[in-house]
Image (tube, rainbow, N blue to C red):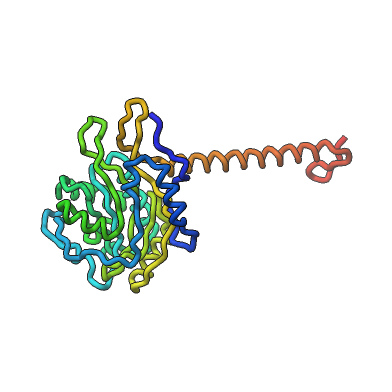
Amino acid sequence: MLSALFSLGLASFSLPCRAQVPTAAQVADQNEQLPTVLRSVQITQHLNAQLPLDTRFVDDHGQPVTLGQYFDGKLPVILTTVYYNCPMLCPEEMDGLTSALEMVHLTPGKDFQVVVISFDPTETPKLAAEKKALYLKRYGRPSTADGWHYLTGSQASVGSVTRAIGFGYVRVPGPDGNMNQYAHASAIEVVTPQGRVAQYFLGVEFPPQAVADSLLAASGGKVGIRVPNILTYCYRYNPEIDKRSLMVVRAVQIGGIATVASLGGFLFFMFRRDIQLAHQQDLQPGAERPGGMDKG
């Protein structure tokens, strides 16, 4: 089945730099090209929005918590909303975040907090703990466990947070026909120690230096700027049976393959040209052999 690699030019990430933001007309035109279900899973950037810090969740130890417990007025927070049983996009996003943090010279729990919220209200603290253990092991710094927080909560709790950050998602049927999967896009948010949204990173690959810079800026209460809404979706459309199911739009992998192939072709062409030029020079009358010896 063909994936929904739309003609929107989906990209893997957006840097928090000064880039042209699409106009309302361009966004409307873009949305018209999307399948209907994806029009409700956009990410609307609510910069400087206050998170609902009194919202109640359950942490990966099974203990009741409030979102505000992770905002102490001192440390910025990396916030992301996923669902732990996601078969495709969410693991890619968490892998990307973990890889980026491996190259950031800041320490979770000491310099910033990581808060991951499941937007599937049926998921359990046990599952949250399993995912935390998986990514903490992948991160390779078990001493930072207190800086990673995997939460679950009710639909009302989840909804209050996703509305605050402008994160849209919709439940859709999985391959078995049951309504147990979601169509959604991918993003992380950097949030100030006071709980205000400071920066968005879209996609599943996050530039480490930009993440580090955003954390440092957010620690001082600074809010960044909007980035272009170039989204990576978790979604598939099956035209044969006219049903929709989820998949990761592997824009990152496909873009990477295309880049490597292009670079490889360019290098092959350059090497081949150098060899041909050397060979032509070798054949010219009076050309010298190595060591200063004339040919012929």
Direction from residue 259 to residue 139 in the image, left or right: left
Q: Position of residue 268 (x, y in %)?
A: 63, 38
Q: Position of residue 266 (x, y in %)?
A: 62, 41
Asked if one can make out residue 56 in the rendered structure from this viewpoint, the answer is yes
Of 260 and 42, nearer the camera is 42
User: Which residue is farthest left?
Assistant: 63
Identity of the residue drawn at 40% across and 51% down: 205
Q: 31 or 50: which is nearer to us?
A: 31
Q: Quadrant of residue 71?
A: bottom left
Eyeballing the image, is 143 above or below 178? below
- Marks counted in the figure total 0
Where does the N terminus fall, quadrant-wise? top left
In the image, what residue occupies the spot 23% across and 54% down?
Answer: 117
Residue 49 picture location, percent across and down: 30, 66
Q: Position of residue 33 (x, y in %)?
A: 42, 42
- The C terminus - image quarter: top right
Residue drawn at point x = 24 percent, y = 47 percent: 83
